[in-house]
Amino acid sequence: MAQRTKYIVVMGSIMSGLGKGILSSSIARLLRKRGYRVLPIKFDGYLNVDCGTMNPFRHGEVFVLDDGSEVDMDFGTYERFLNQSVTGRSSITGGKLFKRVIEKERRGEFLGRDVQIVPHLTDEIKAWVRGVADEEKADIVLIEVGGTVGDLENGYFLEAMRQLGHELGQDLLFIQLTFVPSLGKGELKTKPTQHANRLIQSMGIRPEIIICRGDEPLTKDAKEKISLYCSVAIENVFDDPMVPTVYQLPEMLEKQNLYEVVANRLQLRKESVEQSEWDKLVGRIAKPSGPELKVAMVGKYTSVGDAYVSIKEALVHAGAACNCRVGADMVDSAEIEEKGVRALEKYDAIIVPGGFGKRGTEGKIRAIQYCREKGVPFLGLCLGMQMMVAEYARNVCGLKGANSTEFDKGTEHPVVDILPEQMSIIEKGATMRLGAYPCLLREKTKAHELYGQAEISERHRHRYEVNPSYVQRLGDGGLVISGVSPKNNIVEMCEWKDGFGIGTQAHPELKSRLEAPAPLFVGLVKAALKEKKG
């Protein structure tokens, strides 16, 4: 008889920004180590259908899945920790839920009933969660509730989880993530956690595990207070410590016996697990044997670290693969326009990432020209590749003023233009070229050498492409077109003949994992190491 699906619900209390996504992913990692098929699900309370139309300054990076879904950046953490791809069905938003319920009401599916939050919306949530679990044949479903307990935006979702807990009994476990502030020198204050726990219990939910973030390690006295006033066993109160790299958190929680507590509660396997490739790579992140590299990310969303989180993580993965530490700094491309490229001279490699809008694009072009002329290893992602093409067209092929029609509709040389299928689109949400697309790599190119195969698949998020009318002229000028789409010959990758300079229309950072680093990032790091050694 097959084991029933188990469910774990992770809720955040007191304040936002505690790292529910990293905690949820770490728990998922511990479960996966024991051979369980883990399905992550994330609820976000915003009324957007997805986060594709959100500004990175407000929401951070938009993460794109293989199926083209634009989702919260926590999904990147899930995929990186689990080393598996998830689908858009794992992303539940307030916008999606209300849209579905209203569409059902318009079709008359509620038989004349007055449609309400309870039971209609909560039933929709429960059916969605259980339906995805069945589709994915999940052993364990790990549900992260976005926002903070007490927010209006997630109250109805928590009510659905309460109902689901009532229906499933011992097959569902609630975990509370909290913050324990400190007044210094070990004076930890547990009162906020006590109040937050009472709020959760007033909703009919009883967390059985409490995990505590804080500026200082959790003391025995603090644990005892939380245990007493929140009615949980003291061995169920855990420290969520500060770690040099987030990839160490599963091990930190393992050492505190978190898995054993979860396994006892949900009746899971408890066999010991030997050290894995993951553990070896985490050790390399913490204490690499190679030198440290400094990489500049020349972009426009420099004031928000989360805007390029997948690129930063891809560099961590490549560093672990090469046994070196890779430090990444943000460099505002608008400042390069104003002050020149001198700020780039201290870096071993440069990345120009994706983005939207004209601001800073000329600075990106100047940074790319600097890399090409000085032999600095370069990687261009999406818009970064488009600007790489514009720079080459201007400064090598002699096409004065070459540009993208996104930024200059009247340019004499539109070397980058809008995709034909995008021209008639008026709506913005989920209308770009989204998701995983195949790419054919040309033999004897750097890209082919790095991937080690002729056909690859990477994720996309763009509306513009290299203009097919200019491909021949660019090639005649020496730009190597190293990858194309098999369907319509769209340029997917290009590279310089000399040195290391590769541009890709895709976002390979989105599929990079610690156990499967993105080949282009590994190539960039290897090239930078080679240059550094001289």
Image: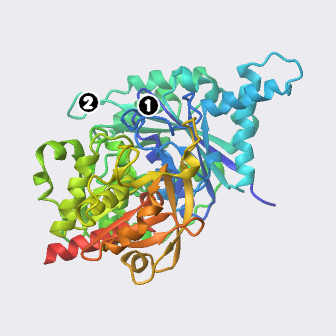
**Figure quadrant of the C terminus:** bottom left
Q: On the rendered image, what quadrant is the N terminus found in?
A: bottom right
Q: Amino acid at mark 1?
A: Ile
Report the side of 391 relative to 491 (left or right).
left
> Which one is in front, 93 or 377?
377
Mark 2 Cα shell of 10 Å, populated few (<14), some (14-19), many (≥20): some
Q: Which residue is mark 1?
A: 226
Q: Is residue 283 left or right of residue 110?
A: left
Q: Position of residue 154 (x, y in %)?
A: 57, 27
The answer to whether the residue labelled 1 contacts the one labelled 2, judged by CB atoms less than 8 Å apart, is no
Q: Is residue 144 visible?
A: yes
Q: Residue 187 has which mark?
A: 2
Q: Nearer the viewer, residue 7 or 498?
A: 498
Foreground pick, 320 / 254: 320
Give the alpha-carbon distance from disc 1 to disc 2, as whole Å. Answer: 14 Å
Which residue occupies 46% across, 65% down? 491
Q: Position of residue 435 (x, y in %)?
A: 56, 54
Q: Residue at x 68, y 49 (%)?
A: 6
Give the mark nearest the N terminus, 1 or 2.
2
> How far across and down, in percent of the image, does residue 234 sit?
47, 39
For badge 2, the amino acid type reads Glu
Relative horizontal placement of residue 161, taking residue 450 as reference (left or right): right
